[in-house]
Amino acid sequence: MKLNEKLATIQTKFKSKKSRYNSFGKYNFRSAEDILEATKPYLLELKVSVTISEKLIASDPFPIMETTATISDGDPDYAIHATSIVGIDLNQKGMQMPQKFGSASSYGKKYALGNLFLIDDTADSDATNLHDKAPIARVIKNTLTSEKDPAYPKAVEFIKKGGKLSAIKAKYNISKEIETKLTTL
């Protein structure tokens, strides 16, 4: 069985209850740990492993973490990845700095795993509850669609100095043409 078939098996059979309760928002939710626990029976059965990695991809105007969930069956040349991007609220009241990063890490893991295993949390109160606050403004990315864009020479210089394309993509919506050009530098 190919890796994509193994992943499809998990995606179609996956069951994870929302076993956690948020007393502040009064809703049930599932955590990254719940998702990982629900996948464990498939790991040995399908001879796959699931790993999670995190990296800081931006720090200004606030830290942004990229979390990647990966499924592999041992072939070092082939794995399937899903990512999530999470901003870290440095102004969150009542939390120490490690808790702020830990909270963002937990969310990143949960949503990367949700992307990998096709878990739909759109109706999940955890995804929609505002806790009596106004919605947080979304980060609006600039576009980079042409070599004539003022940001293009900066992007080229950034890549040539060892910068990652993912960091550019976190800041800009880039066209396929520009992405191709930047990956060939």
Image: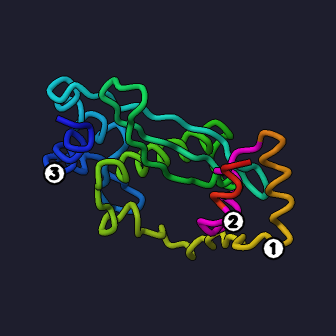
Using the image, tell me which numbered label, if any, was put on residue 172. 2
Mark 3, residue position = 12
Q: Main secondary structure of the magenta part?
A: helix
Q: Is residue 170 magenta?
A: yes
Q: Quadrant of residue 34?
A: top left
Q: CA distance from mark 3 to mark 2?
A: 34 Å
Of 171 and 85, which appears nearest the observer?
Answer: 171
Q: Measuring from the top left, give residue 74's x and y in whole percent.
A: 33, 23
Q: Residue at the spot x=71%, y=54% of the render?
A: 182
User: Callout 2: few (<14), some (14-19), or many (20+) C-alpha neighbours within 10 Å?
Assistant: some
Q: Give SS at disc 1.
A: loop
Q: Say which label, 3 or 1, has the lower sequence index.
A: 3
Q: Residue at the spot x=73%, y=54% of the render?
A: 62
Q: Measuring from the top left, give residue 24's x and y in whole percent.
A: 42, 58
Q: Quadrant of residue 152?
A: bottom right
Q: CA distance from mark 3 to mark 1?
A: 43 Å
Q: Measuring from the top left, give residue 60's x and y in whole percent.
A: 79, 54
Q: Give SS at disc 2.
A: strand
Residue type at mark 1: give it. Asp
Q: Residue at the spot x=63%, y=58% of the render?
A: 180
The answer to whether residue 90 is visible is no
Of 6 and 94, which appears nearest the observer?
Answer: 6
Left or right of 113, for residue 172: right
The number of numbered discs placed on residues in the rendered structure image is 3
Callout 3–callout 1 Cβ contact below 8 Å: no
Using the image, tell me which numbered label, if any, was put on residue 149. 1
Of 32 and 176, which appears nearest the observer?
Answer: 176
**Residue range of the region highlighted in magenta in the rendering:** 163-178
Residue type at mark 2: give it. Tyr
The answer to whether residue 98 is visible is yes
